Image (cartoon, helix red, strand yellow):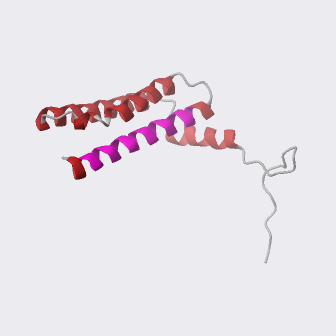
Amino acid sequence: MTATPPTSSPVSNGDQGADFDDLARKFVRVARLRRPRVHLALLVLLGVLVAVCLLATITRASAVPLIPLAGLAVSGYAVWRLRTAVTDRQLVGQMTLFAVAVSVSLWSMSYLARTLL
């Protein structure tokens, strides 16, 4: 069995450090997260999801479809913070928050449609 040599230099406490800043920089460059068109596309996506929730509320004559709006509000906050992020690490963190909040909102939409409505 052959062991591969470590690729990153040891950290002061002796552990191998994964260079998260370098990884974040590569992710931002590949996904082009610094471009204003990406931010606009995310806002349009949020607008469409909010419109679907509001349309479902009017169609069903019930306030239950408004529940996913809480997650969409969190993702809107993340997009707002995404525009003001200075470092790549902050940008990746806000993008992660956006993705998790939208995922929870979509899950709650499907759960509500399947069980309650």
Q: Position of residue 46 (x, y in %)?
A: 33, 32
Residue farthest to the bottom? Answer: 1
Q: Residue at x 24, y 52 (%)?
A: 115
Q: Does the rendering let one see residue 111? A: yes
**Nearer the observer, 19 or 101:** 101
Q: Quadrant of residue 73?
A: top left
Picture quadrant of residue 21? top right
Residue 117 % position (x, y): 18, 46
Q: Relative to the observer, which residue lies in front, 66 or 6?
A: 66
Using the image as rendered, state which of residue 105 and residue 36 is in the foreground.
105
Q: Per the image, is 101 magenta? A: yes
Which quadrant: the N terminus? bottom right
**Residue 89 location (% of width, % of height):** 62, 34
Q: Please tell me which residue is depicted at 21% across the width and 31% down the height of the picture.
A: 54
Query: Eyeballing the image, is 114 above or below 78?
Result: below
Magenta-drawn stretch, dominant element (helix, strand or loop):
helix
Q: Residue at x 53, y 21 (%)?
A: 84
Q: Over which residues does the magenta segment extend?
A: 91-112
Residue 32 in view: no
Was residue 111 drawn as part of the magenta stretch in this picture? Answer: yes
